[in-house]
């Protein structure tokens, strides 16, 4: 049966895009429930540390290097942070601006971890580093066409830096110790952003990026990107489907590099949209044939990447199998693209002798049924190309020199990678009418469904669906799964309403005195005070069905 939900008005201007050619390597990754990631992605942290036995090195937000050497030699590092400034997005609007940051680095940088944070509305982004004179113009937001930029040009001109999980507000791309992405001297960071505001109120969102650098002498491997992409999507209406393929790189890799397929996997980040329910990667061929090395389920606004420490050695394999699962509860077939269309792709970082790309661009067909799931399969076209200077290891001169840290840009000194969380002001005035209908479109849909997991095709976390046709009955009849010690909504008493507490407090505490995550999930900060105040007023007025 088709699923009936209350959705915001259609967003005008949504546009579909052609599939990227091979080695576009542009992935906006999926979010929610990563399997046993080896990295700490706590949004409250403004510094990182790396433990090596009894010694710890910390990186600061000031660009200064810090090191505790009491236990012997430890890696030396630094952190640089940049704010791209705010971006304004109207109600129910979608936009695709580009943004650039000229780093001002006179020497190469070796990045072990990339941080990205935003205030919401950022659907996905794929980041590249290019020569700082490749796309002349001021730093900040601009129309991509004005400088002739697109992701294909970004790949050809530079190299892949980072990809963001779908609708994630904060995440880190943290590689194992000694593994880095290299940023060549005199580089610019650039991307085309996909902003989407499903709410009824205008949105101002600030974007920040940070790099954790290590000294060239501590670099063990400069990773290179590879991509798997299924672009010939055919997702039938009102059905579950699986789109799968097998990308066998082995023969071409061996012919091109003179080495057997010996990829060592350091990082994986998949990407699908609102109809996606899962993504898997298995080893194809060799003694480990069929072994599952990555699985992601659902879509929740959380970061979806996984680091492998130690790296996963694929020597002896022929390639990789991958699949995306979809639950198309709509009444129309869905293909590849943005807006209300879907994607199925993955960015990986690996130690390999060449750059790799595998893409299904045509020829997909139904090959069977797995229970209620229609299985589609397409042929994977593989490409192996040489690596450029962006993937070379540090020179002897770099290793012998002190750690180079570029000077901070205007306003970037002492800037943390994420904004500090501040509890909602209980005395703030509501910025919208305090009715349930206004709260649905202004607060609950954008904060609890779009950027989280309470409603939509992938299910309703803890059984709560803010897209329910009868939202009033859903909220007041919901049995809180957490040990909250209070109902989700207590009419007349906001402070005894769990929904208000998790939206109004940075560190809400359950009935056992244990701190739990605030909402929206994976958001460094809370929703605007005026919207939280409207929720408080609605509850205080009796939580009416208005």
Image (cartoon, rainbow, N blue to C red):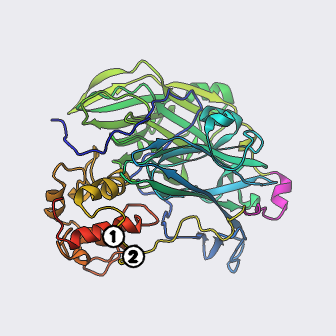
Disc number placed over residue 425 in the picture, else none: 2
Quadrant in the rendering for residue 54: bottom right
Give me the C-alpha separation between circle 1 and circle 2: 8 Å
* Residue 180 image point, x, y percent: 65, 53
Quadrant in the rendering for residue 135: top right
Disc number placed over residue 533 in the picture, else none: 1
* Residue beneath the point at 46% across and 65% down: 524
Instruction: Provide the major secondary structure of the magenta segment.
Output: loop
Is 524 situated above or below 34? below
* Span of residues in magenta: 395-408
* Residue beneath the point at 43% across and 44% down: 93
Residue 315 falls left or right of residue 33: right
Residue 508 falls left or right of residue 373: right
User: Does the rendering let one see residue 119?
Assistant: yes
Give neighbour class at mark 1: few <14, some 14-19, many 20+ (Cα, 10 Å): many
* Residue beneath the point at 50% across and 27% down: 19
């Amino acid at each position: 049966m088709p699923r009936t939900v209350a959705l915001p008005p259609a967003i005008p201007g949504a546009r579909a895009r052609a599939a990227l050619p091979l080695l576009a390597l542009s992935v906006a990754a999926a979010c929610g429930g990563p399997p046993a990631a080896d990295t700490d992605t706590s949004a409250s942290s403004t510094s990182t540390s790396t433990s090596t036995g009894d010694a710890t090195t910390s990186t600061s937000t000031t660009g200064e290097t810090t090191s505790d050497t009491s236990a012997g030699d430890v890696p030396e590092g630094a952190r640089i942070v940049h704010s791209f400034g705010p971006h304004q997005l109207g109600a129910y609007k979608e936009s695709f601006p580009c943004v650039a940051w000229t780093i001002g680095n006179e020497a190469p940088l070796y990045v072990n971890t990339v941080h990205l944070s935003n205030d919401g509305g950022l659907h996905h982004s794929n980041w590249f580093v290019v020569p700082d004179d490749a796309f002349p113009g001021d730093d900040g937001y601009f129309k991509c066409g004005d400088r002739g930029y697109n992701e294909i040009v970004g790949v050809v001109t530079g190299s892949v830096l980072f990809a963001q999980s779908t609708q994630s507000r904060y995440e880190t791309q943290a590689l194992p110790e000694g593994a880095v992405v290299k940023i060549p001297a005199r580089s610019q960071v650039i991307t085309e952003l996909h902003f989407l505001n499903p709410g009824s109120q205008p949105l101002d969102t600030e974007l920040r990026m940070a790099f954790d650098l290590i000294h060239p002498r501590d670099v063990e491997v400069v990773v290179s990107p590879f991509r798997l992409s299924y672009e010939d999507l055919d997702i039938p209406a009102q059905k579950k489907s699986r789109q799968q393929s097998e990308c066998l790189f082995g023969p071409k890799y061996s012919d091109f590099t003179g080495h057997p397929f010996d990829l060592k996997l350091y990082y994986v980040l998949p990407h699908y949209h609102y109809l996606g329910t899962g993504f898997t990667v298995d080893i194809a061929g060799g003694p480990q044939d069929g072994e599952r090395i990555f699985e992601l389920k659902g879509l929740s606004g959380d970061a979806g990447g996984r680091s492998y420490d130690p790296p996963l050695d694929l020597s002896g394999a022929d390639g990789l199998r991958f699949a995306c699962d979809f639950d198309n509860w709509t009444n129309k077939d869905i293909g590849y693209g943005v807006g209300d269309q879907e994607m199925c792709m993955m960015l990986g970082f690996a130690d390999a002798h060449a750059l790799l790309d595998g893409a299904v661009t045509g020829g997909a067909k139904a090959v069977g049924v797995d229970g209620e799931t229609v299985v589609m399969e397409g042929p994977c076209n593989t490409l192996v190309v040489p690596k450029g200077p962006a993937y070379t290891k540090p020179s002897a001169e770099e290793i012998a020199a002190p750690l180079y840290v570029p000077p901070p840009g205007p306003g970037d000194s002492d800037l943390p990678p994420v904004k500090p969380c501040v509890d909602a002001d209980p005395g703030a005035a509501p910025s919208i009418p305090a009715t349930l209908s206004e709260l649905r479109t202004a607060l609950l849909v954008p904060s609890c469904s779009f950027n989280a997991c309470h409603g939509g095709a992938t299910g309703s976390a803890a059984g709560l669906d803010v897209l329910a046709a009868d939202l009033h009955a859903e909220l007041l009849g919901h049995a809180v799964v957490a040990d909250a010690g209070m109902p989700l909504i207590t009419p007349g008493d906001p402070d005894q309403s769990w929904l208000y507490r998790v939206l109004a407090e940075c560190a809400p505490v359950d009935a056992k005195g244990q701190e739990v995550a605030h909402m929206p999930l994976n958001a460094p900060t809370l929703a605007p005070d005026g919207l939280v105040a409207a929720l408080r007023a609605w509850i205080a007025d009796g939580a009416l069905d208005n």
